[in-house]
Image: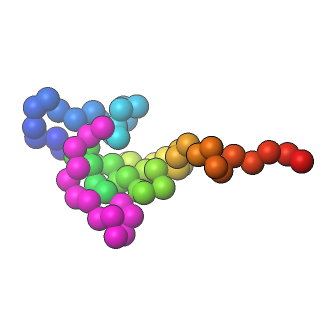
Amino acid sequence: MCQHQPPCPPAESAARESARLVAHHPEQGWSLLCNGVLLFEDTGELLPDGRVIAPHRPLGVDKVMTAA
């Protein structure tokens, strides 16, 4: 899929999120990367083969819950 040099990491790679943007739609909450990965604003991903990567956004300090 990737036509430029150096090529973007493939969708199967752990570095897949570093591929170049092909389309960016922040109003809809998604971006299409050069390697065919759909990246969602919640950090979830849809890979070209249909696999889903669950959101992996780290919790901020203000969102950490403690037990009482």
Q: Position of residue 27 (x, y in %)?
A: 34, 70
Left/right of residue 32 with respect to residue 5 in the rendered view? right
Q: Is residue 52 visible?
A: no
Quarter of the picture containing the N terminus is top left
Left/right of residue 36 with respect to residue 67 in the rendered view? left
Task: Specify start and end residues of the magenta stretch as a single range.
Answer: 18-30
Please, which residue is most extreme toward the bottom here?
A: 27
Q: Position of residue 46 (x, y in %)?
A: 41, 52
Residue shown at the point (39%, 64%) measured from the top left: 29
Q: Is residue 6 visible?
A: yes
Please, which residue is most extreme toward the left here?
A: 4
Residue shown at the point (36%, 69%) measured from the top left: 28
Instruction: Verify whether residue 58 appears in magenta.
Output: no
Q: Nearer the viewer, residue 60 or 35?
A: 60
Occupied quadrant, residue 16:
top left
Q: Position of residue 48 (x, y in %)?
A: 34, 49
**Colour mode?**
rainbow
Left/right of residue 38 with respect to residue 3 in the rendered view? right
Residue shown at the point (20%, 53%) measured from the top left: 22
Q: Position of residue 38 (x, y in %)?
A: 35, 54
Please, which residue is most extreme toward the right here?
A: 68
Instruction: Verify whether residue 20 appears in magenta.
Output: yes
Residue shown at the point (41%, 56%) measured from the top left: 40
Left/right of residue 67 with respect to residue 24 in the rendered view? right
